[in-house]
Image (cartoon, rainbow, N blue to C red):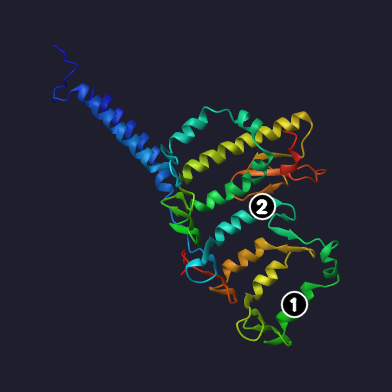
Amino acid sequence: MKRLMAVTGILVLAAGVALAAPASKSTSKSSSDKWLHVRVEDGAGADAERVHVNVPLSLAEAVIPAINVDNFRNGKVHVDMDGEASHLQDVDFRKILTALRDTKDGNFVTVEGSKDNVQVAKQGGYLIAKVREGKEGGTRVDAKIPFQVVEALLSGNNNELNIAAAVRALGEHGDGVLVTVDDEKSKVRIWVDSKNESE
Amino acid sequence: MLNIWRSERGFSVPGGMLAAVGVGALLTGSYIYSQGLIRVSVHEKREGGEHIRLVVPGAIVPLALAFVPAKEIGRHMPAEARQHLPVVEAALGELQRLPDCTLVQVDGRGEHVRIRVQDHQIVVDVDDHEDEVHLTLPLSSLSSVIAKMGRAAEFAGSEKACDGDVTGTWRHAGHHGGGHHDGDHGVTWEEDDDASESPGSSSETL
């Protein structure tokens, strides 16, 4: 009888361990993942709308290749060169990118208009773009994209943007602010870091 | 005389059985607890509005799904669901690895939306002028649903293949083929060579 009880006990414990296994497995935390944060603030005061989006890049990496909708397939966006973007057909972006990468840091494009200023530069491995609309209080756009991300983005075929590769490259790159947009009414900030909450 | 109800050391069989049942109940309870609870709360703010509260153990979901034939689900599965299944599956796999975090937070005038991961559950809170909705879904329960839908989609694909009206089929990982694979999540969509339509558009005749 004692043996019977022992066997019953072992069976109950084994069943318990088997049942508890999925729970213990699910408690494993993610490794040192990077997070893409987007913060949008529209308006001011009590009427302001705030949107915070925090996406782990690992999630984006996993999901993007699974999306197969219209021009977005296997992590790549197909740009229709025959349609509205036909004027892009004659531009070899890869060659331009290679040329930019191999040159020294500096300003490539500076447009100073009566209302708008545009500046495109290379600085410390980053492609930097600055747009200023209006004299004061106008829209200010600052983009600072790592070159390796741009390279990854253009790593597909001629008429493709490799989003999946760009996200992967972003994850491999260090923390930093990618895009900020400021105008009178709204603010947008997109950045990458290792924190899972935006601050 | 032999006493089956009490051993020589004073150990009673009914007592032992009761203990075993108790341990079993304890383990079952801890399993149900570990699987989390599905909570749905909807509160209509208008006068006389409904207030619905639903709390169901997440462990019931795989149990309930076991009684629903995958073939039957596949037969009624919308084309869009089949198309987006790999995306959901891939997202779910990653969400289960995440620590507690807020994924989306929207705060407007009288409107608040928050989607977060907490204790391996997806928690959605919506509070606007009209309704207050709180939803908690254990990711493990969602996984069970998606796995079942994956099998259902497989059936749907094979049925369409039998009808000779197919441009692709769902297959679990491990099979060979040149289809679109969603990584480690076990389902693959394979397009036939002459097929140019997406899985969704191909199955509109379902």
Quadrant position of the N terminus of chain A in the picture: top left
Task: Find numbered disc 1 in the image and state the secondary structure of the residue it sits on.
Answer: helix
Residue at 62% over, 83% down: A124
Query: Is A51 displayed left or right of B82 in the figure?
Result: left
| Frontmost residue, B171 versus B57 | B57
Residue on which disc 2 sits:
A67
Residue at 35% over, 34% down: B28
- x, y percent for residue A97: 74, 76
| Frontmost residue, B177 versus A40 | A40
The answer to whether residue A161 is visible is yes
Q: Which mark is residue B70?
A: none
Q: Is residue A167 above or below residue B12?
A: below
Query: Is B193 displayed left or right of A103 in the figure?
Result: right
Residue on which disc 1 sits:
A98
Dot 1 falls on which chain?
Answer: A
Query: Is B194 displayed left or right of A15 in the figure?
Result: right
Task: Find numbered disc 2 in the image and state the secondary structure of the residue it sits on.
Answer: loop
Q: Nearer the viewer, mark 1 or mark 2?
A: 2
Q: Amino acid at mark 2?
A: Ile
Local packing at callout 2 (Cα closer than 10 Å; few below 14, some 14-19, many 20+) is: many
- Residue most extreme to the top: B1
